[in-house]
Amino acid sequence: MLPTYERLNDPKKAFFRLTFARLSIIALSLPLGAFCFCVVWSLFYDFVRSTFTHCDVANYLPSVSAAIGNYEPQKTVWRLAVILHLPLRLTVAYTYLEYYREHIKRNRRMFGILACTLNIIEDIALFCLSLWTSADNYEIHRNSFVVFIASSECYMLISYLLNRGARKSVLLPHEEKSLRYKRNLFLVNVLAFGLAGYCFMRHNARCEAGVYTFFALFEYIVVLTNMGFHMTAYWDFYAFSIVCDARNGLHITRS
């Protein structure tokens, strides 16, 4: 008897399948792992340099810029993580565009397009401020940071409002969970950003010991809540997968 075999060109057979839940975890773990590494490494091996400011007062935490952009190997680790995770973030942004077209009311879809555009702008701004640090090119870094913060805050707000009040159908349990996280993370993010700005201005005006430490701490919260907000894609696209097969090539489908 001849041995049985499987057709290699079967158009229905998937060559590659990755669930969006797993993609979200990978997209988060790269910058999160790099950020934690940079902060810890700076504290252990570059403490004096990374916590120094022009006021020359006691400070116990490095700012985000100092931790990820001023010293090696932190700078290389952070840049590599941002470069590797950028295609994943852009894929998620495109998927949200399709998601809004399907689930958002027709008269609100322009806001869905706006949200996805802001998401892409945020990703590109993060890429730019990571490649050009304040020490390399202050103007590019400063402008990229302003664009990143503005697009990030606007994106989070519009994304939350769209999912809360502009949907065509009732939210599923995992989508309700995503919406709660979106609301809470956005509120904490805005509060932390305001407190970070206050501590930064107070440190520059009064040069008080420890104030810059609180600025750095609130900066960390801004970064982590931003990452957490994007992680809500885990629940929004829980039933989706990225699939590659002979018939359709690389495409997104429901699992």
Image (cartoon, rainbow, N blue to C red):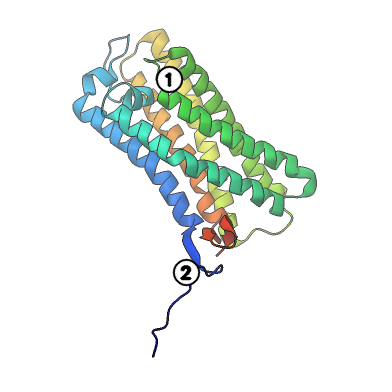
Query: Observer-nearest residue: 94 or 163?
Result: 94
**Quadrant in the picture for the C terminus:** bottom right
Q: Along the horizontal axis of the image, is 3 left or right of 46? A: right
Q: Give x and y (percent) for residue 218.
A: 42, 29
In this view, the residue farthest toward the front is 2
Quarter location, residue 54: top left
Give the residue drawn at x 40%, y 10%. 204
Q: Is residue 112 visible?
A: yes
Q: Which residue is mark 1?
A: 199
Q: Which residue is mark 2?
A: 8
**Which is in the foreground here, disc 2 or disc 1?**
2
Label 2 and label 1: CA atoms lie apart by 62 Å
Give the residue drawn at x 50%, y 55%. 20
Query: Observer-nearest residue: 243 or 72?
Result: 243
- Disc 2 element: loop
Give the residue drawn at x 52%, y 59%. 243
Total numbered badges shown on the rendered structure: 2
- Disc 1 element: helix
Give the residue drawn at x 34%, y 27%. 68
Task: Identify the amino acid type marked 2.
Answer: Leu
Query: Where is 95 relative to 214, above or below?
Result: below
Task: Identify the amino acid type marked 1.
Answer: Cys
Q: Give x and y (percent) for residue 238.
A: 53, 59
Q: Along the horizontal axis of the image, is 184 left or right of 162? A: left
Query: Observer-nearest residue: 32 or 60?
Result: 32
